[in-house]
Amino acid sequence: MKNISPKLYLSSPCFIQTILLNAYAYKLSRQRFGRDFERLLSWFEETEKWSITDLISYQEERLRIIISHAYDTVPYYRDKMRSLKLLPRDIKTVEDLPKLPVVNKDQIKKNLQSFISTKYLKKNLTHGHTSGTTGSPLDLYWDHGIVLMNNAVDWRQKKWAGFSFGDRHAVILGRVVVPIQKESPPFWRMNYIHNQLWLSAFHMSCDNLPLYLKKLEKFKPRFLEGYPSTLFILAKFLLDRGKSLHLEAALTSAETLFPHQKAVIEEAFECKIFDYYGMAERVVFATECRFHEGKHLNFEYGITEIVDEDGLPVKDGSTGKVIGTSLHNLGMPMIRYQTNDVSSIKIDKCECGKEYPLIESITTKYEDIVITPDGKWISPSVLTHPFKPQKNIIESQIIQEKINFITVKIVKNELFKSSDEKVLLSSLGERLGSGIEINIEYVKEIPRERSGKFRWVISRVSRNGVC
């Protein structure tokens, strides 16, 4: 947890961990909630009733602010616009955006400081980063405005799912809230500040899952949030035993939600899934409403383009690359940022009447789930965390060859040191446990599949007999 020593947290007794977790939750509450958050959430209740004309008008008003700000204070965009003989007045509408070139992750990594506004000091911005699954992570900096905006959009999605702030809920995400080596319950910690039960994603074994279910039955959450793969593990365990656990909604993100996962989760929890699409770069946010006909692009948050190989817009209904432009992060604006995702804008409108366009399901990478020798199921999303601090890895891939053996393929740069390997092995070991041998293999490149897709985690371990 940020600003709390992981060693201190993990070495502390359970009740101290709970105190530290709630201290962290209190700090987050002060940063992300309060009157500004409430005003923004109320404003969102009004904007979701706007016409598409009003939404586009707002987008373009914010776009002009971002472009002008970037030209005046962000070295990369100022230099790029001058080289193209462009002034801020030349980019007033969404249709004007293709006058600027697309920016990708590698360009930003090589010129990070030039993408940060000179009006801000790094120490006054919130630091974040991408997952680093297919390479070294991209460092990101967010100002307070985008932190609030991101939180408010997330909570609007929760409200669409029937979720009110303060409702009792549970989460199964990637934070190490319980020491990995712990073999006895509780495998959860309580965040009293937000009425939230944090379940460990690292102790989901056949022996432990009944304890998870018993705790959930006692806690009685209205909602459950997690990665599709973690909720799927719990849901399948329920159905295999002829059981179910009633929830009002399940919320998923961070991974592609596959149809078979969706069917199992909704049956096991007797509710609908509200899946959303967002990213650390804070350029795109798309959320589901109760009709589940696709994900609504939140126009107040950013501008989303679907483009061809030349960076030019494609027609609605046609598939292309997802390009995003931030409308609120003045600290580190991203204009025409190329994501690694592919999608299309749906031609049909949603029955809900909201005029936000719908985006098709995002085509991303399929990952496997790692199984440890003691029967724990480890989601690929929680394995991204050891790679996030790594800056000298160009690309990586995890292959589970046997139940007790994993190979991590790494394409390293010239700055990679033995200490980087030591930190990575230690962090992976903390999450996978001592029963798995981890072998690092340095390679010049990592081959793609015939389809051209890249699988970050590949498991060759049979699932027969598991739970």
Image (spheres, rainbow, N blue to C red):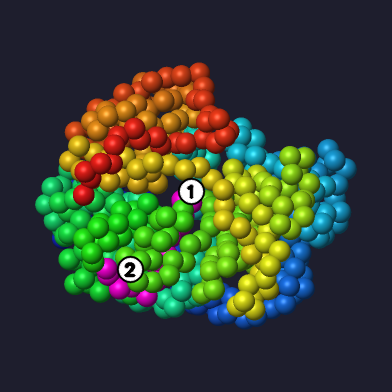
Q: Is residue 428 above or below residue 226?
A: above
Indicate the position of residue 360 as horizontal and vertical percent values: 61, 58
Q: Secondary structure at mark 2?
A: helix
Q: Is residue 41 visible?
A: yes
Would you say 436 lies left or right of 269 here? left
Q: Amino acid at mark 1?
A: Gly
Q: Where is residue 322 shown, x and y percent of the image?
A: 65, 49
Residue type pointed to by label 2 = Phe
| Cα distance in 3D space between marks 1 and 2 | 33 Å
Q: How many marks?
A: 2
Q: Is residue 425 magenta?
A: no
Q: Residues within 10 Å of mark 1 (few under 14, many from 20)?
A: some
Could you say whether the residue bearing mark 1 is in a helix, strand or loop? Answer: strand
User: Which label belongs to residue 42?
Assistant: none
State the residue at coordinates (60%, 39%).
Answer: 105
Tell me if residue 377 comes above or below residue 443 in the rendering. below
* Residue at position x 67%, y 54% in the image: 344
Q: Which of label 1 and label 2 is nearer to you?
A: 2
Q: Position of residue 330 (x, y in %)?
A: 64, 56
Q: Is residue 170 left or right of residue 131?
A: left
Q: Which residue is mark 1?
A: 128
Res 308 → quadrant: top right
Which residue is disc 2 drawn over? Answer: 269
The answer to whether residue 256 is magenta is yes
**Nearer to me, 284 or 419:** 284
Per the rendered image, the range of residues in magenta is: 244-257
Q: Picture quarter containing residue 250?
A: bottom left
